[in-house]
Amino acid sequence: MASQFIPKSMAMMSASMNNFVRNRFKLETQGSQTASPGSIVTIQLPESSLIQLPSVRFYYDVATTSETEGTATVYGRLPADASSALVQKVELFIGGVQIQNGTAEYNTLCRILKIADSSIPRDQSVDKVLSHGAITEADAVESETLCLHEWRGFLGENATQYLPTNLTGAVTIRLTFAGNSVLVPKENGQAIGT
């Protein structure tokens, strides 16, 4: 008989809940399956469930493009910490009421706080894999799968780890993607910044 791991912070509460089951959900975006710079993506979290907020992850695929002017080709390269750098604004609604107003520069805020909290070993290991931790110099466009896992605001910085959506109502996350200005231009045969 296999048992499921229940965190200490949840053990007492789960003992009082009938038929407690821990599940993972793959949620699709509402509307289009693709987004471009400036697009808004809306995600609805499962209703009538107990959501562990630190476990909310947003995985997405990113592809950059290039532009040729005369003989010069310029490639769009992903910035450091691209998983949050590509998100301009995060808004959160619970039961139709906006509880997190979108910060105008969510990506800048995330980068500043990450620099203060992070270390070089973490940046070169976990962040490099999940967040595209460094800008690379290759003369090519990029295609990466990223994971937004360190949320700022209600999803990642609140006192409550668990949110019972059967009591609060539907939870909707609305992400606005940043414009092309967050990409790093890389001209063919030149160093970044030239």
Image: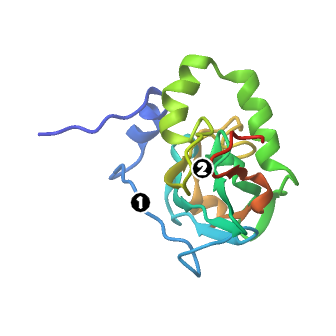
Badge 1 is on which residue? 25
Q: Residue at x 80, y 57 (%)?
A: 181
Q: Amino acid at mark 2?
A: Leu
Q: Residue at position x 51%, y 64% from top?
A: 48
Classify residue 117 as left or right of residue 47.
right
Residue for badge 2: 163
Percent position of residue 111, x then y: 75, 36
Residue 8 vs 158, above or below: the answer is above
Q: Earlier in the sequence, mark 1 or mark 2?
A: 1
Percent x, y of residue 51: 53, 51
Quadrant of the image containing the N terminus: top left
Colour pattern: rainbow
Label 2's element? strand
The image position of residue 140, as x and y in percent, is 54, 54
In the rendered structure, which amino acid carries the disc numbered 1?
Answer: Phe
Badge 1 crowding class, 10 Å Cα cut-off, few under 14, some 14 to 19, many 20 or more, is: few
Question: Is residue 57 in sight in this rendering?
Answer: no
> Residue 147, labelled with which disc?
none
Q: Position of residue 190 (x, y in %)?
A: 68, 44
Residue 98: quarter of image: bottom right
Q: Furthest-bottom residue in view?
A: 31
Q: Is residue 51 left or right of residue 24?
A: right
Q: Quadrant of residue 114?
A: top right
x 68%, y 67%: residue:
67
Foreground residue, 79 or 48?
79
**Label 1, label 2: how far apart the Cα atoms are:** 15 Å
Q: Which of the 4 image quadrants contains residue 123?
A: top right
Name the residue located 52 percent from the left edge and 59 percent from the top edge. 60
Tell me the element at label 1. loop
Looking at the image, residue 24 lies above or below residue 53: below
